[in-house]
Amino acid sequence: MRTAMTVGSLALAAVMLSGLSAPAQASDVSARTGPDPSVTATATPNPGFNDNLSGVYIRTVRYGRHLRQRMDVWYRRDGVARPAVFIIHGGWWNSGDKHSMNSIVRGYAELGYTVFNINYRWSQDAPWPAQRVDALDAIFTARRHAQLFGFDPNRYAIVGFSAGGHIAASVGTYRDGLPGLRAVVGVSPVISPMTAFVDGDLGAAPEQQRLRKAAVALAGGCLPTQARCSKMWASMEVPWHASRGDAPMLTVHSQDEFVPPYHSELLKEQLARAGVAMNIRVVPGFQHSSALYREPGVAEGIQEWLATRLGRIPSAGGGQQ
């Protein structure tokens, strides 16, 4: 149940955003007009693992020129087109690395998916929407080379954690849907940076204050109270971009974590108006992001939900799992 403070925070956020208009998103397209990214890195079976995952190769792919515009691809060379899962790590938009997701990525590879584990530019490298641009470019690069990586470009999902959940949901609501995107999952996703800004005022928990500062940094140091910053903050607000072509979404929050479930409730309301299904799962406790993912039943529930939307996974011999 929402407290009076929660309702007040949401109301204040709504008032602060009421004068803004959702900006056009054409600026994201320009980042995809450069030279074709490199896919020439050497593919080595399971580097860094002692217990080999049979038949799976890992290749690091450059999808842009920046050091962090890289992704690791976990794939099989059996000529079978598999559904894919894109993983986006968290880290306050200003830290974190794809390698922290390796155990989670491995779980999806074991299930038979092709998995893309993405790094992206931090907020100190470039402000929003650079992070969404990077995720889009990674996806477009993967789809261009779908045959090389053995995946079906018309069957993929995105799973994002915390700040990575914000990026995943932003990609999921980009324009009127992306070709081939079947599902989006957010684990402790920061759906509304504006709500995080309001909730992180003086007197809030340290994590909420830190998230407020991180949201401001994502906006390039621009405060939502400044008129010149209105378009930036509107662009960062995922609920404002919901449309009928968006993929269905699942989000998971802990009841008492610092990114509370009402972040997702804001998006669910807007997606419902567009006729798009969204499920919100709330787990007791205060675990956040990957720690929440490891709570009993959470990973299994997400995997089951994805399986119903991505369909059967071909086996190495061409059959169905």
Image (spheres, rainbow, N blue to C red):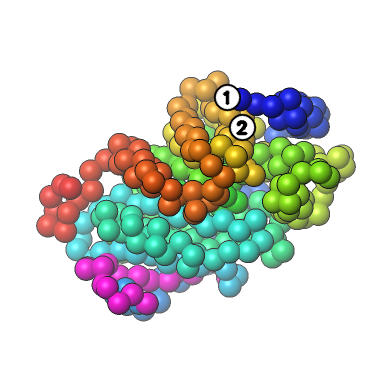
Mark 1, mark 2: which one is toward the viewer?
2
Instruction: Please say if 152 is above or below 95.
Output: above
Q: Main secondary structure of the magenta part?
A: loop
- Whether residue 246 is visible to the viewer of this picture, yes or no, is no
Give the residue type at disc 2: Tyr
| Magenta-colored span | 48-65
Residue at image coords 49%, 65%: 100
Residue at image coords 57%, 45%: 286
Q: Quadrant of the N terminus?
A: top right
Residue at image coords 73%, 47%: 205
Tell me the residue that label 2 is attached to: 262
- The 10 Å Cα crowd at callout 2, few under 14, some 14 to 19, many 20 or more, is many
Give the residue type at disc 1: Glu
| Image quadrant in which you'd find residue 265 | top right
Instruction: Please say if 61 is above or below 127.
Output: below
Element type where label 2 sits in the image: helix
| Image quadrant in which you'd find residue 79 | bottom left
Residue 105 vs residue 239: left or right? Answer: left
Q: Residue furthest front?
A: 285
| Residue 238 x, y percent position in the rendering | 62, 38
